[in-house]
Image: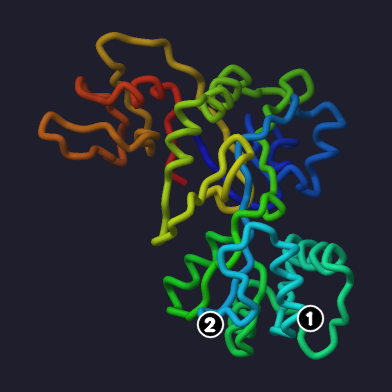
């Protein structure tokens, strides 16, 4: 399986270079790709999580609230600084929260200076105030920088953006490995997969940072993905051994008889003691890119 992460994933799919696309449901190219009949029915597989980021002192007293509108209203009522993150998602959320909170006067506490991501967080920290950003990129930034800010409000479903996987339509685009794409889609939606990823924790977060089935937090996938699947392999017993230059086991759980994890660059081997999960995945091999 070859994985490509970029904004223009649907461009790759239009060129026949992807079998399955994973993107935000609101991706600028998603509607056209589907309405033109180039993709099969989108399936929601997880959600991308934003968060209200605030200082440890929490001057507005919003830490742990589950209602983002109530939290924003407290920020406005206490005139605590709020810095707009001008990226598309966070700007939309800021405008929504301002409208839902009753359109409070923005003078002297609401700062919109065109900052994004880390710069917005730094400015909010300097002012002792709040901002909005993606949960995972914030946690990564905090780990690198040591900035004294925290995810103050996370649990409101307003902060979730659905992500979907779309199988490329083989009747419109030639060369699509539709069976492999559908198999991977089924795997992503399987209860066992969703439960396994639902329990994932990252960077010291006490919250789940992956939201499967569109229910909870944030995916570990950065941006959008285009996946080109290799041809399927027939089931084999004993486990399949096959050389594929430049590839390795998708699961990363293949082990030698001594229990050493195996990721040799020249081949992907499924040893006799592979996990059952790894055996089920032998048709999906991840190309090094």
Query: Residue 113 in the image: x percent, y percent?
Result: 77, 83
Of the pair 252 and 215, the residue shown nearer to us: 215
As measured in the structure, the alpha-carbon distance from the residue carrying label 2 to the one carrying label 1 is: 22 Å
What residue is at 69 percent from the left and 41 percent from the top?
A: 12
Picture quadrant where residue 270 is located: top left
Tag 1: Cα neighbours inside 10 Å, few (<14), some, or many (≥20)? some
Of the pair 31 and 168, the residue shown nearer to us: 31
Query: Residue 282 in the image: x percent, y percent?
Result: 39, 23
Against 158, residue 167 (above or below) is above
- Please name the colour scheme applied to the rendered image: rainbow
Q: Are marks 2 and 1 in contact (CB under 8 Å)?
A: no
Residue 57, disc: 2
Against 273, residue 206 (above or below) is below
Query: Residue 247 in the image: x percent, y percent?
Result: 38, 36
Number of the front mark, 2 or 1: 2
What residue is at 29 percent from the left and 34 percent from the top?
A: 253
Per the image, label 1 sits on a secondary structure element best described as: loop
Residue for badge 1: 112
């Amino acid at each position: 399986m070859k994985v490509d992460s970029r904004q223009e994933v649907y461009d790759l799919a239009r060129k026949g270079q992807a079998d399955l696309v994973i993107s935000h449901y609101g991706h600028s190219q998603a509607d056209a790709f589907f309405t033109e009949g180039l993709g099969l029915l989108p399936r929601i597989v997880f959600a991308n999580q934003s968060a209200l980021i605030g200082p440890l002192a929490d001057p507005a007293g919003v830490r742990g609230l589950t209602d983002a509108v109530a939290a924003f209203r407290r920020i406005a009522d206490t005139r605590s600084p709020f810095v707009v993150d001008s990226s598309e998602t966070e700007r939309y959320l800021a405008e929504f929260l301002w409208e839902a909170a009753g359109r409070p006067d923005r003078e002297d506490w609401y700062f919109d200076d065109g900052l994004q991501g880390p710069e917005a967080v730094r400015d909010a920290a300097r002012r002792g105030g709040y901002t909005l950003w993606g949960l995972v990129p914030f946690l990564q930034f905090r780990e690198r920088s040591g900035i004294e800010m925290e995810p103050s409000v996370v649990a409101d479903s307003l902060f979730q953006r659905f992500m979907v996987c779309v199988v490329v339509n083989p009747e419109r685009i030639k060369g699509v490995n539709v069976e492999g794409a559908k198999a991977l889609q089924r795997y992503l939606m399987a209860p066992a997969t969703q439960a396994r990823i639902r329990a994932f924790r990252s960077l010291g977060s006490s919250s789940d940072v992956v939201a499967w089935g569109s229910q909870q937090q944030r995916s570990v996938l950065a941006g959008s993905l285009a996946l080109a699947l290799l041809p399927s392999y027939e089931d084999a017993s004993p486990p399949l051994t096959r050389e594929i230059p430049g590839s390795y086991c998708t699961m990363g759980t293949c082990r030698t008889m001594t229990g050493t994890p195996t990721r040799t660059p020249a081949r992907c081997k499924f040893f006799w003691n592979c996990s059952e999960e790894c055996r089920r995945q032998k048709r999906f091999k991840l190309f090094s890119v």
